[in-house]
Amino acid sequence: GVDPEVVKKIEGAYDILQKDEKGHSLLKKYLSKEVIEKLKNKKTAMGASLWDCIQSGVANTDSGVGIYAPDAESYTTFSDLFYPIINDYHIGFDISKGAKHPAADFGLAKLNFPNPDPEGKYIVSTRVRCGRSLQGYPFNPLLNEQQYKDMEKKVQEALTGLGGELAGKYYPLTGMTKEVQTQLIEDHFLFKEGDRFLQTANASRYWPTGRGIFHNAAKTFLVWVNEEDHLRIISMQKGGDLLAVFKRLIEGVNQIEKKLPFSHDDTLGFQTFCPTNLGTTVRASVHIKLPNLSKNLDEFHKIAGKYNLQVRGSAGEHSEAVGGIYDISNKRRMGLTEYDAVKEMYDGIVELIKLEKASE
Ligand code: ADP
Ligand code: CIR
């Protein structure tokens, strides 16, 4: 069973979340007393409890979501909490009503994304990323130090074989100078350090062991190793040529999956640590300046929401917009194909640029 001290923490979570009036997380919305009663004594085969899933959201009541899965089994063991959160975040993907994530389809044969901003007036850069987990390993909180080292070695070997435009080099975080690390973060290439949401989820243990970044010389193709997910595969470049960015990502994913076995599930799609990333795991984004539309932030978020888009700051999630540059991406990643997730971002951005022009 679950340690009585841990059960107490789970029970205490309810009041902590409800009493914080400024908190609006999905965890707060769906962690009812009934759910707590039903789940507080459950454990996955690897030993994860409900507390392991919710501790980040309890420590950070300003979370947007507030829950992570320490292993893939947590999604079913604690489904009474995960499924409603998944349904809410992914805008109507209700597993409890039998929803299944569609098979992967990047739509390579039908891709058609003419640059929505050929003059480069609005879009600063375009990026598409996806997450992958290695078969046979749990997510961060349940990994030991040796597993981090083994995984890093496997991934590094696989990436070293990449060819053509994708060929590059792996740079472990261990031994990287602060200057290089800081510059890579500032240039939007590397994950940040000390993320409190990940730390309190127990996802940053043994840092920087096993963590690192692979990239080609142009830094248009990058792979993050063992940050939030085992792998984050990224394609990005300046300007608004989404077609080139997405094609490069598809090529990268195809090459890597020939070398590494990824965890996939018929219901959940590709399995990830955070429920927001399940399914396609695809976040297609632009860094964009829309000075008129973003004058009224509430209104800006509302308009973006109409197109199922999410607005982030210029250094990513939980950051501010610097110099009027926003990061706008598809919000949902589940219940639609990779092609449709990217198209959702594209169509929304085309509309936002039209609206911006109309208000000039
Ligand atoms: P993720 O995309 O992996 O969910 P973040 O929101 O933290 O995580 O973003 C990671 C990094 O990618 C940040 O530095 C962010 O500014 C950068 N980024 C995201 N979208 C773009 C883009 N379109 N152009 C340039 N950098 C981007
Ligand atoms: C939050 O709830 O705000 C954080 N735990 C992040 C949630 C979604 N973002 C992510 O997966 N990168």
Image (tube, helix red, strand yellow):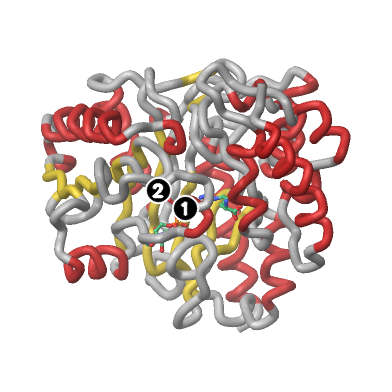
Q: 350 above or below 122?
A: above
* Horizontal arrangement in the rendering, residue 239 relative to residue 318 (left or right): left
Residue underneath mark 2:
204
Circles 1 and 2: CB distance less than 8 Å?
yes
* Horizontal arrangement in the rendering, residue 283 relative to residue 191 (left or right): right
The residue at the point 54 percent across, 40 percent down is 274
The residue at the point 31 percent across, 70 percent down is 186
Disc 1 CB within 8 Å of nearest ligand 2 atom:
no
The quarter of the rendered structure image containing the N terminus is top right
Mark closer to the chain start, 1 or 2: 1
Q: Which mark is residue 199?
A: 1
C-alpha span from label 1 to label 2: 5 Å
Q: 353 above or below 113?
A: below
Q: Secondary structure at mark 1?
A: helix
- Give percent across and percent down for residue 233: 33, 41
Q: Place residue 119 in its image quadrant.
A: bottom left
User: Which residue is more in the foreground, 53 or 294?
Assistant: 53
Amino acid at circle 2: Ser
* Horizontal arrangement in the rendering, residue 350 relative to residue 23 (left or right): left
Mark 2: few/some/many CA within 10 Å (<14, 14-19, 20+): many
